[in-house]
Image (spheres, rainbow, N blue to C red):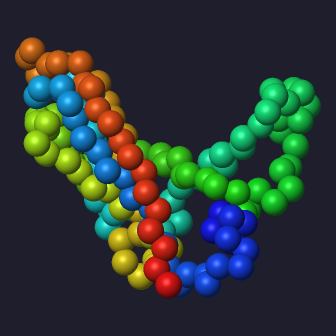
Amino acid sequence: MYRRDHPDGPGYKRFIALSFWRAFSPPPQDWPLALCDGASIADDEGVRNTLVVVDEMPAPDDLERPIAGEAEMIAASVFRYRPDHRWWYFSNLTRDEAILIKFHDSDHAVAWRCMHTAFFDDSLPDAKTRESIEVRLIAYFL
């Protein structure tokens, strides 16, 4: 994406993708944010889920054809449950609290991704409908 948008740019050595997440509803929330400890995710886990932006719906036969340049397109990963995953969840966030998630780091020598999701938690009495905002950022290091 950087090279496409800035072909004459200086380039970068590393990038990280971040998510700034904040709840507006009072605690406890009915759909808490859950984060998986990056150290409990194996490097070979995850199935590529490519973002494909189109101007119109493709024909049914085109939906399963290979996409030229797919390896260079923006993609997330989809994960399957493993008992080794360690999850943390936050059902009591207040308006004064925020979470910064590093969900991808091009430097795989450090914790380089963080699975995150939300789930319906009916165990909390008087849980409020979660209202929240997420802002995504990408930082490039020269």
- Name the residue at 81% across, 60% down: 69
Horizontal and vertical percent position of residue 80: 47, 46
Horizontal and vertical percent position of residue 131: 27, 26
- Name the residue at 72% across, 41% down: 53
Q: How many marks?
A: 0
Q: Residue furthest front?
A: 8
User: Is 34 drawn above or below residue 119 in the view shown?
Assistant: below
- Name the residue at 14% across, 36% down: 95
Q: Is residue 132 left or right of residue 109?
A: left
Residue 114 seen from this side: no
User: Is 113 drawn above or below residue 96 in the view shown?
Assistant: below
Q: Residue furthest top?
A: 126
The quadrant of the rendering that contains the N terminus is bottom right
User: Is 95 drawn above or below residue 106 in the view shown?
Assistant: above
User: Is 21 drawn above or below residue 63 in the view shown?
Assistant: below
Horizontal and vertical percent position of residue 78: 53, 47
Horizontal and vertical percent position of residue 7: 73, 74
The quarter holding residue 129 reads top left
Q: Is residue 57 left or right of residue 18?
A: right
Q: Nearer the viewer, residue 99 or 34?
A: 99
Q: Is residue 36 left or right of residue 142?
A: left
Residue 127 seen from this side: yes
- Name the residue at 25% across, 25% down: 130
Q: Is residue 44 left or right of residue 84?
A: right
